[in-house]
Image (cartoon, grey):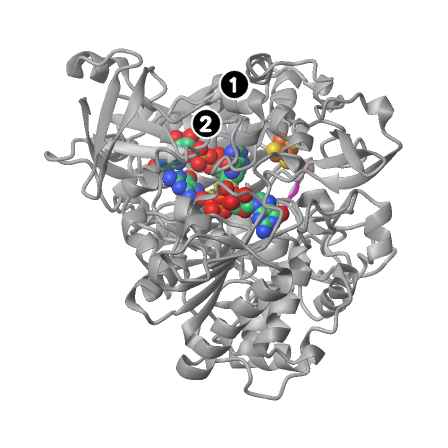
Amino acid sequence: MMSLSRREFLKVTAAGIAVSVLAGPAMAGQQSDEADKWVKGVCRYCGTGCGVLVGVKGDKAVAIKGDPNNHNQGLLCLKGAMLIPVIYAEDRLLKPMIRKGGKGDKLTEVSWDEALNFAADRFKKVLAENGPKAIAYYGSGQALTEESYVANKMWKGGFKSNNVDGNPRLCMASAVAGYISTFGKDEPMGTYDDIDAATCFFIIGSNTSEAHPVLFQRIAKRKESSPNVKVIVADPRRTNTSRIADLHISFKPGTDLALMNGMAHVIVRDEMDDARFHGKYCNFMKGADAVTFEDYKKFLEDYTPEKVEAITGVSAATVVKAAKMFVESAPTISLWCMGINQRVQGVFANNLIHNLHLLTGLICKPGSTPLSLTGQPNACGGVRDVGALAHLLPGGRLVENEGHRKEIEELWKLPPGTIAPANGRHTIALYEGMASGDVKAVFIHCTNPAHTLPNLNKMTKGLQTAFVAMTECFKSAETVKYADVVFPAAFWCETEGVYGCTERRYALIEQAIKPSGEARPALDILMEFGKRVGVDPKLIPFANAADVWEEWRLMSAKSVYNFAGMTRARLKKESGLKWPCPTESHPGTNRRYVKGYDPLVPDNHPDPIFFYGKPNAKATIFLRPYVGPFEPADADYPFVLTTGRVIDHWHTATMTGTVPELQKAYPGAYVEVNPEDANKLKIANGDMVMLETRRDKMAFPARVTDTCMPGLVFTPFFDPKLLVNKLFHDAADPVSREPEYKICATKVYKV
Ligand code: MGD
Ligand code: MGD
Ligand code: SF4
């Protein structure tokens, strides 16, 4: 059984001690030696993508342990190690339900046939009366690749509706647009192996210790290996991650673009840049205009360390120190997550991280790489790569590109002109469209938007009026309250499919046990629903997930996302493979764009690096000015509110909330207040404190702690009883359309 408590886990990871004991079997009340067999899979939770082995006895899952052959080398964090009891939680949805009498009515259990027909009839009616723009699919970076692929194909190719979006819009959209604008193609060039080769870690806007615990353990282990390994953590909060930092840079929220331009200023000023590298491999661009290195130097004059100090609150000396450490302690890996992506300048912030690597030539080398951490377990493989967003098509293609549409129409054997030429609605526009009545029916899969969208009072209006069909596994999910039809889905190892994690690694979750109750694999639900609405069965001729994978695998050979070598049989044998992987004998790719590693770089290419994503083979260093957050603190709302994760809960806690050990650790939301502010406002630990924003107000118990700087308060968003997203605005990055969950202005007072 588990041999480490949550508190002990935090302590050892903070201290950088290896936690291999976490590889031990977990939970479900039975010892692992009672398992008859072990079935390979991937953890249900974060984008670290740890491999697992599920122990099965009879028809029950009884234990779990880390897969020693996957990148996590047998380690799991506590959440992952406690997945088994989630399968058997009392809260599981076991029967289809519908609201026969419409929105005000209660949900009633019905047969599958009745539920599917109920949903399909409504969608058919909307399609007939209002056309394809009036229906939508809202999916998830937690759905299996085969599910997202089929949903995308049915919507864009079958219903001719590009209204396909999902929660990766709230999460990775800025990282996607960052990679595409800088390198021409999405997804990182490096992998986790770079962690073991790096001697400098630049962690910005990521609380890796709580959000990617097993990766953090790998970083901490590397840090422990030598005093020469340096860690820079740039985060307004002093998180558990910052405890291993040599340099923790705490800046005013939303000002880190100035910080990164300041670091670039020092790098250029002190001639720490690699002129041969950026001269050969980079363009300089100001918006859409090509400029020169000299123009870039001039642009950086606005970001002297002193000017940056005035904007960010970080001392000029610290800006210089950070720049020097970034270069002098190389090889350097940058790791970032929602502190960067969930910003109205999220794409620019991503570009500026890439700039630091391109400017210094610290890229495409062992240990030197900008590696965006993915939040969800399958946002990369399932949504980004499959193209299940409103502006994308599979394999990195774009809806608005006529040639790309044609290619997909040919691959899907559709008549020319089938795919609509305009982008569908991104998430915010989708929910606005539901509220305005333009979108009349939505199919929600594997996500809980009534809890997680920003500006919830506004966003849930659409859910109150549009027809909502959804898949779910747990009754208490907030969105169920708005559903007209709820399809109970098979959970995690009750079905099979592929997950693709941060490092371009695709790994197969094999079915270990039968679905609970009457739950069915979501792939079957989606296809059955689609056929009843009128999708041509020839478009989805799949008997099972393996058939879907076969089509997608073969299709991938026609794109840079080439994983044609990953047959189902191979994925069953191996614990994940990293694309590009064009043939069955190819071992997978550790370093993209590099000759001798990336199969897409010809052996006879004249240069060792080839940024083939760009027409001129050059990556772009962008001149991206600092602009502040959408809603900074002001005289009326004098504090900044930020939100995020805690180690023991997954998002809306529908899963982790069912595990007493995890729930007890974090029974409810709270607000972290700096002691200086607490003193001024006469707030003590445990006092109820009101957060009042321009949208709503809500009271939380106080935790007086110096994790937040004065003027900043933090609250986690997992608690269904305190829907903190009612407090937030829905302003988003103009390119990625990812909302700025990380910053809004608030009043803070004792109740
Ligand atoms: P967050 O807590 O959202 O987690 O993983 P992270 O992004 O690491 O935010 C990260 C940090 O951003 C916070 O520490 C916050 O202080 C900082 N921040 C706030 N404002 C700013 C700013 O202006 N600039 C910068 N640079 N930083 C700022 C998210 C990831 O976690 C995601 S996306 C998902 S989907 C997964 N969810 C998840 C979970 O729900 N629970 C757990 N335990 N793990 C998870 N892993 C994944
Ligand atoms: P989850 O709780 O992960 O949150 O937001 P959501 O995706 O809405 O929702 C997954 C849902 O799927 C749950 O209801 C779960 O019970 C259900 N489920 C679990 N397993 C299965 C399955 O196998 N099949 C099916 N059909 N359903 C299943 C996440 C979103 O939240 C993200 S990704 C980000 S990055 C945003 N982060 C963020 C933030 O940092 N701050 C604030 N304030 N809000 C945020 N919202 C966003
Ligand atoms: Fe699961 Fe993430 Fe923990 Fe790994 S680090 S066990 S993927 S939650």
Residue 233 — which label?
A: 2
Whether residue 547 is situated above or below residue 586 in the rendered picture: below
Residue at 34% over, 49% down: 345
- Residue 224 among magenta residues: no
Compared across the picture, whether 559 is left or right of 289 comes to right
Contact, CB < 8 Å: mark 2 with mark 1? yes
Circle 2 residues within 10 Å: few <14, some 14–19, many ≥20: many
In what quadrant of the picture does the N terminus appear? top right
Q: Looking at the image, can residue 63 be seen? A: yes
- Predominant SS of the magenta segment: loop
Q: Mark 1 points at which residue?
A: 244
Name the residue nearer the viewer: 87 or 172. Answer: 87
The amino acid beneath tag 1 is Ile
Name the residue nearer the viewer: 692 or 627. Answer: 692
Q: Does the residue labelled 1 lie within 8 Å of ligand 1?
A: no
Stretch in magenta: 188-192
